[in-house]
Amino acid sequence: MNTPTLASDLNLCLCHSCGKSCDMSGRPLFCERCGAPLHARKTNSLSRSWAFLLTSLVFYIPANVLPVMNTSMLGNGADSTIMSGVLEFWQHGAWDIALIIFIASIAVPGVKFAVLSLLLVTAQRGSNWARKERSRLYRFIELIGYWSMLDVIVVALVAALVKFHGLADIEPRVGILFFGLVVVFTMLSAMSFDPRLIWENPTQREVANGIASH
Ligand SMILES: [Zn+2]
């Protein structure tokens, strides 16, 4: 099969700052035109991405176990976790709010964890399985990333909505802080992942790492 020429084959590296293709044969650390540091790949992409992902997974536990809000419906004050909040809204007939919270707070982070783990494991093994689809998955995760704070915004919005309608009184609890941290760390994990690793074979990676880890 005819494989296209890679920048590393030609000993070139594109400057992230000004777009100049720099000759890497003399192992320059900085772009000769604008002085920005040159990296063939994001430095320690896999370890960083794993570290952020595992951190967010750790925070996901208190985010779900600890109460995220205190709702006093009809005078009965009660702390509720994300899941019990969803069930509570559902039982009170507010299925739309229940669905929004479920998608934003449980389904979206779950999908992110699954996709990021898949991308990291396959990239680490230098797998050539479904590369195009995996690239698409990465772009999908990036796209979700733009809407990440949705989880936190939804809770704020629900609180405002509920108060406005006088259905109940809602106050935030410590769980929502962990939720925000989960969102931030999954975003950092996705940002640290270098999608070019999907297309690399382990032998190429050694060459690229040699250039990146200067
Ligand atoms: Zn430059």
Image (tube, rainbow, N blue to C red):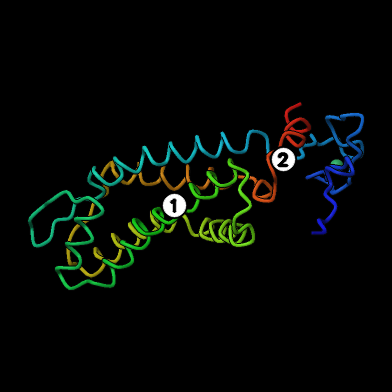
Q: Position of residue 120 (x, y in %)?
A: 54, 44
Residue beneath disc 1: 114
Q: Residue at x 59, y 62 (%)?
A: 133
Identify residue for label 2: 41
* Number of marks: 2
Tag 2: amino acid: Arg
Give the crowd class for mark 2: few <14, some 14-19, many >=20 residues within 10 Å.
Answer: some
Q: Foreground: 136 or 66?
A: 136
Query: Residue 115 in the image: x percent, y percent?
Result: 49, 53
Left or right of residue 160: residue 131: right
Task: Say what secondary structure mark 2 lies in.
Answer: loop
- Residue found at x 76% / y 30%: 210
Is the N terminus in the top left, top right, bottom left or bottom right quadrant? Answer: bottom right
Q: Residue at x 87, y 30 (%)?
A: 28
Image quadrant in which you'd find residue 26: top right
Q: Which mark is residue 154?
A: none
Label 1 crowding class (10 Å Cα cut-off): few <14, some 14-19, many 20+?
few
Height in image: 37 above or below 176?
A: above
Among numbered discs 2 and 1, the one appearing first in the sequence = 2
Q: Secondary structure at mark 1?
A: helix
Q: Quadrant of residue 96?
A: bottom left
